[in-house]
Amino acid sequence: MTGQEPDAVLSVENLTKDYPGVRAVDDVSFSIQSRTIHCLVGENGAGKSTLVKMLTGALKPTSGTMKVRGADYRPGNPHDAREGGIATLFQELHVVDELTVQENLTLGMEESRFGFLVKSDLDRRVVATLKAIEPSIDPATRVSRLSVAQKQIVEIARAASSGASVIIMDEPTAALSEREVERLFGVIRRLRESDVTVVYISHKLDEIFDLGDAVTVLRDGKHIATKPLSEVAGRAELIQMMIGRTVFQSYTPRDTVTDDTVLVARNLSNHLLQDVSFHINRGEIVGFYGLVGAGKTEIARAVFGADRFTGSVHFKGKDIGGSPERAIASGIALVPEERRTQGLFTSMTIRENIPVMNLRRLSNGGVYRSSAERAAAVEYVGKLSIATDTIEKHAEKLSGGNQQKVVLSKCLFADADLLLLDEPTRGVDVGAKTEIYAIIRDLADRGNAVAVFSSELEEVLGLCDRILLLFSGSLEEEIANGPEVDVAHILHVVTGGGEHAVQ
Amino acid sequence: MTVSTATEATARPGRRLSDEAFITSLVAAVAVGLFIVASVAVPNFFQPLSMLNLITNNWAVISLGVGVSFLLVSGNFDLSVGGIVALSGVLAVWFAQAPDGANALSTGFGFPTWLAIVCAMAGALAVGGLNALFVVALRVPSIIVTLGAMMVARGIAQVITQGSQRNTNLPDDFGVLGNLTMFGTSVKLPVVLMIVLVLVAVFIEKKTVFGRLTYWIGANPVAARLSGINNALHLTRLYLFSAAIAGAVGILLASEFKSGFSNRGTLMEFDALVISLLGGIAITGGFGSVIGMVFGALILAVVTSAATGMVLSPDWQFILKAIAVFLAIVTQTWALARRNR
């Protein structure tokens, strides 16, 4: 699947990207045919986003070449990519709410003379493009009055009218309802008719079969296959290509799992969750696995009392009520999803970060015991091997892995019986990952209950005794981890294939 | 590595100044430096009495600065303190005035002085509670809420005094508190109270859980909440704390002058904010100290009184304050960035 095919609009050859210690994209070569919808699939960490970043000029490849219509293409920045005819639609929207649709479409392309805007045929052109792909949007409407889906379409129209021949879309349907997805698909198909090539990235396999002409599968940074979707025999084959035969789990059954239930959650529902019920036992590591937006974070935050929900959470037989303060007081601690904005006091030192969740342990009648605080900091820096020369180092100056260890220290210091770990190893290097896994196992071995909320299958399979599979806010299935666990089945369920299997 | 990290960490606590100590020393150095320059350059500036006056003339603003500093550290503004000073002073006078005055402005409730003071404090705390309600429960930005509360408080004071002042028909003991001199010197009670307040505030800030909570909330309110801190309760306490200080200042000033004046304390909220910022408290919250604020007040006092001692007319003091604030904040930002590069 290498080399130049007659009608390739975009091709990459031997493309490689190295990060310190990791090869994120490994010798990838494939080409994308003109006027097709080309899907890019792979698990988290397979190298999709690194590849896209290289195509859009946000990252420079370590080696290898990229070509657009046969000509060498070396974008130094996103602007170069636009010039080269490649536009990207990111998950976050880049439209200006206060301007009209038409003003948004011409933004940054206005023609001026002596600083004054002059009329050109630009306006006519962008309106024509918009009419062609979505006639129902009035160019004179303010963007703030549009829905998320419509805003996305405005962005697509902007990309198309800027003359892009390739538009990359990164999970464009993540925030859309089913009807809006249909509408977006209509737009994408009309784009193809008007000679635009779409590179479509999604975790939802149904969408890929619905929409795509061809698919490229990446796994562990390597190119697995590029072929027309008509030659792919259903979801099973695609999943097989995504996960391969690699046995990437190192799970060994743990003997400290008890039947002593500490947490019972019943019928948790909110804007995303639908009737989620589960329990967690003492000594057990329970994994919540699902794609981005499946409801993992929402469950963790509901149990912790950080968000409103309906339903009940009972911890050790008691209703713990709806605030993090009370959750911590009754023995639950949370490692939040975003460590820099939700977990850490980045402008403060390691010493000042660690004690915050258990102030009773460090104070006497409201008077703070600074010596005990220092001792605790030294103890946890040692215990979790946080790499720093002093406990007085500001948290913002630590690496991702060490920051995460500081957040973990906070929770460990709280002496909680149940730890909720939301993406505990996101953005953490491999070495620190292994250390964090060891800490988690050790906690469970000592009788604590641990819930791991993760979008990395490898993590869940390597660590958890029991795995709950989520898809779009509901709990689809519960499976026990073990050597015979069916990875293909798990992926089938979390990509939306299991809706009718349960319930 | 584990072991060596741990021992290293214990071996060198405090060998390097913390950022906070660094900024506080910087502010202190500037204050002392300015004082020396003023003593050399300005005739009659260096006299024991003028040094004492630097502090005693500013007891009200420094006291207000304590509450304002704590709130700034927590990431919130309190612009209502000047208005509360006017309100509580006017209320105290009104409640204490005898009920049988010749006209409306000399007629009050005839409460005994202690009761009048209690009622005036209640009025001050009510404004603080209003601040807390809007900031905490309704999540309105504190700069707007407290700006509104300032106008409400001063507005009520203006209505009660009919835009003027109440200074007649007061019991004799009403003027005691504000004019009591201490230890056989000319130092008045409010100055001593201010010093006690600063010492207590420093203790709270450095040594208590309450002080620590303020920093955590200011550094990252989201993480603070997820770490089990009750932000709402703490901010409510801080607003009440600040309002109580402002209420007490207002009552002491009313007692000192034996009058309730609706324009008293005008611009004090800005002076309190300015000395806090001069003292190195970060406007974004999470950083700063009360000691720094006190040195900030000294910087401002030296600059303004030195200017008056020179040929400059008092009309220049706003411009001088502005220059001092700009210079101080630019210097601090630059020094911190350089140090943490």
Image (tube, rainbow, N blue to C red):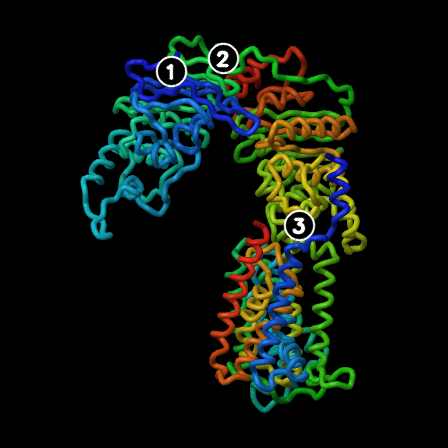
Residues behind callouts 3 and 2 on a single chain: no
For image coordinates 71% across by 37% down, the residue present is A332
Mark 3: secondary structure: loop
x, y percentage for residue B12? Answer: 74, 48
How many other residues sit within 10 Å of disc 1, few (<14), some (14-19) or many (≥20)? many
Parent chain of label 1: A
Q: Residue furthest right?
A: A364
Q: Which residue is mark 1?
A: A214
Q: Identify the secondary structure beneath mark 1.
A: strand
Quarter of the image for residue B269 reads bottom right
Nearest to viewer (mark 3 / mark 2): 2
Q: Label 2, on which residue?
A: A241
Q: Amino acid at mark 3?
A: Asn
Q: Residue furthest bottom?
A: B102
Q: Quadrant of the N terminus of chain A?
A: top left
Disc 1 and disc 3: Cα gap in Å? 53 Å
Q: Are marks 3 and 2 in contact (CB under 8 Å)?
A: no
First of labels 2, 1 by sequence position: 1
